[in-house]
């Protein structure tokens, strides 16, 4: 049996491997056909330098493209048509997704924005598709990683009968966010409070919604914020409800949060015990894995290494003897030479880390970067195709 989280090198391969499982899964696929819209957005500047090489939704997260976590969850919940609201490099996503989606009967439509349309405008732009058939539909922010409880989400939404439902998640410091205040018994949203200075609640918008087609009557075809314009009006009319999101949640659209989300995701997978490529324990060659660690089967790891916790090792990665890795992601084709130490970092595709190198401080290395031996890097952002031959002791962008 192949796990849905089995790492693969591209979307087409993922769909080819998992189409039979998706189509045979005894969930709600045959009970209802739904649509979803994913707010892909634009340049992905917060996740640079990785998004200089590919659009953010295709950047690997736990060894599969970020968007794939959402698409597979939507398909299992009965969605058969996904609209991607994009305004940047749509042709790249179409090339990666088109043939793959066909294999599992997932239709993907690209809704191209000539200007940024905010978070509500894309719904109006795709109005004809979303209201076709009169079914409820999901809307997702593309940066969100969680356990995607779409089945329970939809049941809650249908039970209250309102126009919309948003998933909310609890946070420790609500003063940094816009807080959702709702009736504790019914979930009906009473108001939104932006960065409250006194405690009014600790639940924030998780960026996952389900709507009745009626909500489209509220949205004009113009750049519009669903959070600032549409939601308050719905709340005033008592047509918007909140449901608590179980499990973990993270917006992984910038490097520190990408790493936090990675740790949460790995912990969640380890608890569920359903990922055959999770590693722990000690090998005969002295290399030790401290769970949770996700390793692609094609990766080569030398002797005497110490890997984990919270490490993702991608396809074709080579790690030489004595390396120490924790809280990091190594993407396809990365080469880590002997006795290097990497902590709190993302190393991009086909980059090389020299021997006895120390990397830390949420360093992000772009595609095809060459780091020479015996260097120290702290909090660097290294653009693709660069050679690093000097220490980077303080956070800076290497262009």
Image (tube, rainbow, N blue to C red):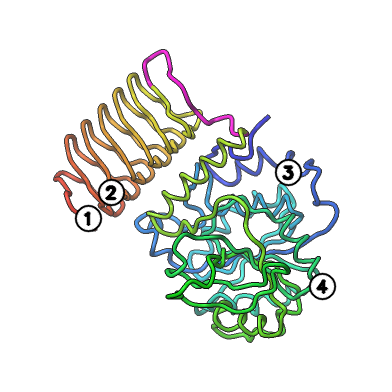
Frontmost residue, 189 versus 213? 189
Nearest-to-viewer mark from 2 and 4 = 2
- Crowd tier of the residue under label 3, counting other residues whose Cα lies within 10 Å: few below 14, some 14–19, many 20 or above: some
Q: Residue at x 23, y 34 (%)?
A: 354
Q: CA distance from mark 1 to mark 4?
A: 51 Å
Instruction: Check contact, mark 2 vs mark 4: CB within 8 A.
Output: no
Nearest-to-viewer mark from 1 and 4 = 1
Report helix, strand or loop for mark 3.
Answer: helix
Is 181 part of what is drawn in magenta? no
Q: Which circle marks residue 361 in the picture? A: 2
Q: CA distance from mark 3 to mark 4?
A: 25 Å
Q: Which residue is under mark 4?
A: 134
**Range covered by the magenta-colored residues:** 274-287
Q: CA distance from mark 1 to mark 3?
A: 44 Å
* Residue 246: % across, % down: 63, 53
Left or right side of 290 for 5: right
Report helix, strand or loop for mark 4.
Answer: helix
Q: Which residue is under mark 3?
A: 22
Q: Which badge, 3 or 4, is on the more N-terminal residue?
A: 3
Report helix, strand or loop for mark 2.
Answer: loop
Type of secondary structure dominating the magenta stretch: loop
Q: Residue at x 31, y 50 (%)?
A: 362
Report helix, strand or loop for mark 1.
Answer: loop
Q: Which residue is under mark 1?
A: 395
Instruction: Check contact, mark 1 vs mark 3: CB within 8 A.
Output: no
Residue 214 higher or lower than 321, as above or below: below
Q: CA distance from mark 2 to mark 3?
A: 39 Å
């Amino acid at each position: 049996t192949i796990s849905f989280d089995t790492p693969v090198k591209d979307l087409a391969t993922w769909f080819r491997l998992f189409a039979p499982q998706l189509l045979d899964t005894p969930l709600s696929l045959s009970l209802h056909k739904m649509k979803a819209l994913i707010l892909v957005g634009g340049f992905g500047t917060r996740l640079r330098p990785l998004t200089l090489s590919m659009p953010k939704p295709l950047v690997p997260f736990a060894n599969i493209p970020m968007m794939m976590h959402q698409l597979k969850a939507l398909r299992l919940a009965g969605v058969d048509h996904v609209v991607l609201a994009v305004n940047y490099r749509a042709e790249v996503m179409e090339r990666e997704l088109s043939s793959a989606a066909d294999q599992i009967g997932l239709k993907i439509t690209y809704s191209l924005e000539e200007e940024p349309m905010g978070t509500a405008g894309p719904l109006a732009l795709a109005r004809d598709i979303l209201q076709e058939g009169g079914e409820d539909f999901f809307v997702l922010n593309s940066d969100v990683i969680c356990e995607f409880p779409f089945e329970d989400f939809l049941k809650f939404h249908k039970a209250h009968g309102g126009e919309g439902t948003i998933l909310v998640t609890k946070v420790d410091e609500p003063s940094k966010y816009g807080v959702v205040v709702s009736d504790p018994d019914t979930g009906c949203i009473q108001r939104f409070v932006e960065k409250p200075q006194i405690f009014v609640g600790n639940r924030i918008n998780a960026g996952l919604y389900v709507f009745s087609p009626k909500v489209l009557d509220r949205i004009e075809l113009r750049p519009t914020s669903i959070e600032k314009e549409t939601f308050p009006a719905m709340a005033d009319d008592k047509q918007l409800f909140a449901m608590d999101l179980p499990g973990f949640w993270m917006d992984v659209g910038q490097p520190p949060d990408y790493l936090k989300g990675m740790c949460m995701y790995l912990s969640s997978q380890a608890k569920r015990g359903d990922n055959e490529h999770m590693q722990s324990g000690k090998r005969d060659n002295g290399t030790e894995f401290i769970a949770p660690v996700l390793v692609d089967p094609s990766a080569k790891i030398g002797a005497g290494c110490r890997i984990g916790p919270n490490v993702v090792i991608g396809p074709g990665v080579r790690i030489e003897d004595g390396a120490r890795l924790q809280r990091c992601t190594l993407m396809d084709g990365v080469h880590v030479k002997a006795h290097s130490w990497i902590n709190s970092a993302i190393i991009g595709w086909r980059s090389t880390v020299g021997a006895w190198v120390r990397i830390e401080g949420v360093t992000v290395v772009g595609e095809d970067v060459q780091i020479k031996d015996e260097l120290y890097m702290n909090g660097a952002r290294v653009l693709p195709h660069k050679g690093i031959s000097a220490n980077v002791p303080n956070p800076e962008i290497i262009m």
